[in-house]
Amino acid sequence: MALIPWEPSEIRNMKNIFDDFFDMGMFPRQGRLQKRWLEGGEWSPVVDIIDHKDKIIAKAELPGVKKEDIKITLSENILTIRGERKKEEEVKKEDYYCCERVHGSYSRTIALPVDIEKENITSSFENGVLEIVLPKAKESKPKEIEIKLK
């Protein structure tokens, strides 16, 4: 199994907030944040992981992304969602009043806590929410043990 470097998104986001704050304060029109927004940039979909008795459900918010621009892979219990949110139209830099919507490539990688039945995975995409249902392998399901009184 290959090791994947991991940095919690909260820490990465906090670093970006501090960088953006200082960049915008010193150089209001040339900060990293403004450059990233205007030229397309980094973003990562938020994901919920729900662990049911017999399956794991992953829900990812992907507003403005088309179904054909999403790729889902599962390798050695590592779920990866990647793709691209494309620009809707070309707008000149100087015409922007405010630009907060980010576009560009994204990728989320999540280590799953149990083995998955790969042949029974299903997914759906509705209203900008991707849902992936990952059935647990039979060996991974918890076995309840009945307690008998003596």
Image (spheres, rainbow, N blue to C red):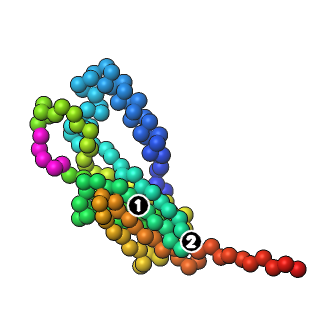
Badge 1 element: strand
Q: Is residue 84 visible?
A: no
Place of residue 117 in the rendered image (x, y in percent of width and height, measured from the top left):
47, 76
Instruction: Identify which residue is drawn at 43% across, 63% down.
Output: 58
Residue 47 lies in quadrant: bottom left
Magenta stretch, residue numbers: 87-91
Image side of residue 95 versus residue 65, left or right: left
Q: Main secondary structure of the magenta part?
A: loop
Place of residue 91 in the rendered image (x, y in percent of width and height, measured from the top left):
12, 40
Residue at image mark 2: 53
Placement of 121 over or under 112, stated as above or below: below
Q: Is residue 8 visible?
A: yes
Mark 1: amino acid: Lys
Residue 93 in magenta?
no
Label total for image: 2
Instruction: Identify which residue is drawn at 11% across, 44% down.
Output: 90
Return the disc, 1 or 2, that comes first in the chain's sequence.
2
